[in-house]
Image: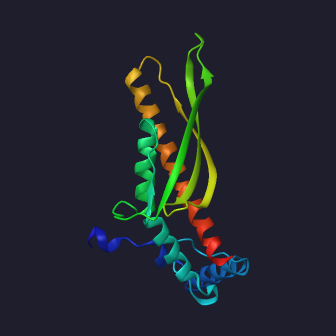
Amino acid sequence: MSRAGSSTSSSDRRPAGASRRALLVLAAGSLPLAACGFRPLYGSGGGAAGGLAGSSERVRGILASTQVGLIPERTGQLMRRSLTEKLGAAGASSPVNELRVSLQLSAEPEGFRRDGTASRVRYNATASWQLITLTPPPATLAQGVERTFDSYNVPDNQFFAADFSRDATMVRLIDQLADDIVLRLSVRLGEANTG
Protein backbone atom coordinates (compact mmCIF):
# COMPACT_ATOMS: atom_id res chain seq x y z
CA MET A 1 0.00 0.00 0.00
CA SER A 2 1.38 3.40 -0.91
CA ARG A 3 2.06 6.03 1.68
CA ALA A 4 -0.43 8.47 0.12
CA GLY A 5 -3.18 5.85 0.19
CA SER A 6 -2.74 5.11 3.88
CA SER A 7 -3.18 8.64 5.18
CA THR A 8 -6.53 10.01 6.23
CA SER A 9 -7.55 13.55 6.96
CA SER A 10 -9.10 14.58 10.21
CA SER A 11 -12.36 15.43 8.46
CA ASP A 12 -12.80 11.74 7.51
CA ARG A 13 -12.92 10.77 11.17
CA ARG A 14 -15.67 13.21 12.17
CA PRO A 15 -19.22 11.99 12.64
CA ALA A 16 -21.66 13.12 9.93
CA GLY A 17 -23.56 15.41 12.31
CA ALA A 18 -20.46 17.38 13.35
CA SER A 19 -20.29 19.43 10.15
CA ARG A 20 -23.99 20.28 10.39
CA ARG A 21 -23.51 21.36 13.99
CA ALA A 22 -20.61 23.59 12.99
CA LEU A 23 -22.72 25.23 10.28
CA LEU A 24 -25.58 25.81 12.72
CA VAL A 25 -23.22 27.40 15.26
CA LEU A 26 -21.74 29.61 12.54
CA ALA A 27 -25.18 30.67 11.31
CA ALA A 28 -26.42 31.37 14.86
CA GLY A 29 -23.28 33.39 15.59
CA SER A 30 -23.74 35.58 12.53
CA LEU A 31 -27.36 36.52 13.31
CA PRO A 32 -26.45 39.16 15.93
CA LEU A 33 -23.99 40.70 13.46
CA ALA A 34 -26.68 41.05 10.81
CA ALA A 35 -29.10 42.55 13.31
CA CYS A 36 -26.66 45.24 14.45
CA GLY A 37 -26.01 46.49 10.92
CA PHE A 38 -22.66 44.75 10.36
CA ARG A 39 -21.64 44.70 6.74
CA PRO A 40 -18.38 43.90 4.99
CA LEU A 41 -16.38 46.99 4.07
CA TYR A 42 -15.10 45.81 0.72
CA GLY A 43 -17.68 43.15 -0.07
CA SER A 44 -20.65 43.59 -2.29
CA GLY A 45 -23.82 44.25 -0.38
CA GLY A 46 -26.87 42.19 -0.91
CA GLY A 47 -30.05 41.01 0.66
CA ALA A 48 -31.15 43.24 3.51
CA ALA A 49 -28.21 45.57 2.99
CA GLY A 50 -30.08 47.39 0.23
CA GLY A 51 -27.92 49.80 -1.73
CA LEU A 52 -24.67 48.78 -0.12
CA ALA A 53 -23.16 47.44 -3.34
CA GLY A 54 -23.45 50.88 -4.91
CA SER A 55 -22.02 52.43 -1.76
CA SER A 56 -18.89 50.26 -1.77
CA GLU A 57 -18.43 50.81 -5.50
CA ARG A 58 -18.74 54.55 -4.91
CA VAL A 59 -16.17 54.44 -2.09
CA ARG A 60 -13.76 52.39 -4.23
CA GLY A 61 -14.18 54.93 -7.03
CA ILE A 62 -13.38 57.84 -4.71
CA LEU A 63 -10.35 56.04 -3.29
CA ALA A 64 -9.05 55.17 -6.77
CA SER A 65 -9.40 58.80 -7.92
CA THR A 66 -7.40 60.13 -4.97
CA GLN A 67 -3.80 61.27 -5.19
CA VAL A 68 -1.58 61.30 -2.13
CA GLY A 69 0.20 64.59 -1.47
CA LEU A 70 3.93 64.76 -0.89
CA ILE A 71 5.06 63.84 2.63
CA PRO A 72 8.57 64.97 3.63
CA GLU A 73 11.51 62.69 4.53
CA ARG A 74 12.11 59.00 3.87
CA THR A 75 9.31 57.83 6.15
CA GLY A 76 6.98 60.16 4.25
CA GLN A 77 8.02 58.57 0.97
CA LEU A 78 7.28 55.13 2.40
CA MET A 79 3.89 56.35 3.67
CA ARG A 80 2.98 57.91 0.32
CA ARG A 81 3.88 54.74 -1.58
CA SER A 82 1.93 52.52 0.83
CA LEU A 83 -1.14 54.77 0.72
CA THR A 84 -1.08 54.95 -3.08
CA GLU A 85 -1.01 51.15 -3.29
CA LYS A 86 -3.78 50.69 -0.71
CA LEU A 87 -6.03 53.32 -2.28
CA GLY A 88 -5.70 51.66 -5.68
CA ALA A 89 -4.73 55.04 -7.11
CA ALA A 90 -1.43 53.99 -8.69
CA GLY A 91 -2.78 54.39 -12.22
CA ALA A 92 -5.13 57.35 -11.64
CA SER A 93 -4.61 59.76 -14.54
CA SER A 94 -6.90 62.57 -13.46
CA PRO A 95 -7.28 62.66 -9.66
CA VAL A 96 -10.35 64.31 -8.17
CA ASN A 97 -9.24 64.37 -4.52
CA GLU A 98 -6.00 64.69 -2.61
CA LEU A 99 -5.12 62.92 0.61
CA ARG A 100 -2.83 65.11 2.71
CA VAL A 101 -0.95 63.41 5.50
CA SER A 102 1.25 64.85 8.24
CA LEU A 103 3.48 62.23 9.84
CA GLN A 104 5.14 62.52 13.26
CA LEU A 105 7.48 59.96 14.78
CA SER A 106 9.02 59.78 18.23
CA ALA A 107 11.35 57.23 19.78
CA GLU A 108 11.80 56.35 23.43
CA PRO A 109 13.98 53.71 25.07
CA GLU A 110 12.11 50.96 26.87
CA GLY A 111 14.93 48.85 28.25
CA PHE A 112 18.47 49.53 29.40
CA ARG A 113 21.64 47.54 29.80
CA ARG A 114 23.87 47.79 32.86
CA ASP A 115 26.04 50.37 31.10
CA GLY A 116 23.01 52.62 30.47
CA THR A 117 22.62 52.00 26.72
CA ALA A 118 19.20 51.20 25.33
CA SER A 119 18.33 47.55 24.75
CA ARG A 120 14.83 48.17 23.35
CA VAL A 121 13.36 51.17 21.53
CA ARG A 122 9.69 52.03 21.04
CA TYR A 123 8.55 54.18 18.12
CA ASN A 124 5.29 56.08 18.36
CA ALA A 125 3.76 57.25 15.08
CA THR A 126 0.93 59.71 14.55
CA ALA A 127 -0.59 60.55 11.18
CA SER A 128 -3.03 63.44 10.77
CA TRP A 129 -4.86 63.23 7.45
CA GLN A 130 -7.38 65.15 5.35
CA LEU A 131 -9.18 64.19 2.15
CA ILE A 132 -9.66 67.38 0.12
CA THR A 133 -11.33 67.91 -3.23
CA LEU A 134 -9.18 69.34 -6.00
CA THR A 135 -12.07 71.30 -7.53
CA PRO A 136 -12.30 74.98 -6.64
CA PRO A 137 -13.17 75.84 -3.93
CA PRO A 138 -11.47 72.93 -2.12
CA ALA A 139 -13.65 71.16 0.41
CA THR A 140 -12.70 68.70 3.15
CA LEU A 141 -14.51 65.39 2.65
CA ALA A 142 -13.01 63.58 5.66
CA GLN A 143 -10.24 63.99 8.20
CA GLY A 144 -8.79 62.15 11.15
CA VAL A 145 -5.80 61.18 13.24
CA GLU A 146 -4.35 57.67 13.42
CA ARG A 147 -1.81 56.46 15.98
CA THR A 148 0.24 53.31 16.33
CA PHE A 149 3.44 52.11 17.97
CA ASP A 150 5.99 49.34 17.58
CA SER A 151 9.22 48.32 19.30
CA TYR A 152 12.43 46.59 18.41
CA ASN A 153 15.33 45.11 20.32
CA VAL A 154 18.81 46.61 19.98
CA PRO A 155 21.24 43.69 19.81
CA ASP A 156 24.46 44.10 21.77
CA ASN A 157 27.45 44.96 19.53
CA GLN A 158 25.57 44.14 16.30
CA PHE A 159 25.14 47.51 14.66
CA PHE A 160 23.87 46.28 11.28
CA ALA A 161 21.30 44.08 13.03
CA ALA A 162 20.10 47.10 15.02
CA ASP A 163 19.77 49.16 11.81
CA PHE A 164 17.89 46.34 10.13
CA SER A 165 15.53 45.98 13.11
CA ARG A 166 14.87 49.73 13.15
CA ASP A 167 14.16 49.81 9.40
CA ALA A 168 11.82 46.81 9.64
CA THR A 169 9.98 48.50 12.51
CA MET A 170 9.56 51.66 10.42
CA VAL A 171 8.11 49.67 7.52
CA ARG A 172 5.65 47.92 9.86
CA LEU A 173 4.63 51.23 11.46
CA ILE A 174 4.08 52.97 8.14
CA ASP A 175 2.15 50.02 6.72
CA GLN A 176 -0.09 49.87 9.81
CA LEU A 177 -0.79 53.60 9.66
CA ALA A 178 -1.61 53.39 5.95
CA ASP A 179 -4.02 50.50 6.62
CA ASP A 180 -5.68 52.47 9.42
CA ILE A 181 -6.02 55.62 7.29
CA VAL A 182 -7.56 53.79 4.33
CA LEU A 183 -9.93 51.84 6.58
CA ARG A 184 -11.08 54.95 8.47
CA LEU A 185 -11.41 56.90 5.22
CA SER A 186 -13.49 54.12 3.66
CA VAL A 187 -15.79 53.98 6.67
CA ARG A 188 -16.27 57.76 6.72
CA LEU A 189 -17.01 57.89 2.99
CA GLY A 190 -19.46 54.98 3.36
CA GLU A 191 -21.20 56.72 6.26
CA ALA A 192 -21.46 59.93 4.25
CA ASN A 193 -23.21 58.04 1.45
CA THR A 194 -25.70 56.21 3.67
CA GLY A 195 -26.29 58.90 6.28
Is 44 located above or below residue 141 in the figure?
below
- Residue at the location (53% across, 82% down)? 54
What is the x, y in percent for residue 137?
Answer: 55, 61
Q: Quadrant of residue 148?
A: top right
Q: Is residue 56 left or right of residue 37?
A: left
* x and y percentages locating residue 175 in the rendered image: 48, 49
Question: With 24 as the anchor, is 103 left or right in this view?
Answer: left
The answer to which quarter of the image holds residue 123 is top right
Q: Number of callouts in the render?
A: 0
139 relative to 12 in the view: left or right? right
Residue at image coords 48%, 65%:
63
Query: Left of 103 or right of it: where is 65?
Result: left
Q: In the rendering, at what x and y percent does residue 40 appear?
A: 58, 74
Q: Is residue 153 above or below residue 70?
A: above
- Visual colour scheme: rainbow
Q: Position of residue 124 (x, y in %)?
A: 60, 37
Using the image as rendered, state which of residue 20 and residue 95 is in the foreground.
Answer: 95
Please determine whether, in this image, residue 161 is positioned above or below residue 194. above
Q: Name, please, the residue furthest toward the bottom.
A: 47
**At x 53% / y 76%, what residue is drawn?**
56
Residue farthest left in this picture: 2
Residue 22 in which image quadrant: bottom right
Q: Quadrant of the N terminus?
A: bottom left
Q: Quadrant of the C terminus?
A: bottom right
From the viewer's side, name the closer residue of 27 and 21. 27
Q: Residue at x 65, y 78 (%)?
A: 194
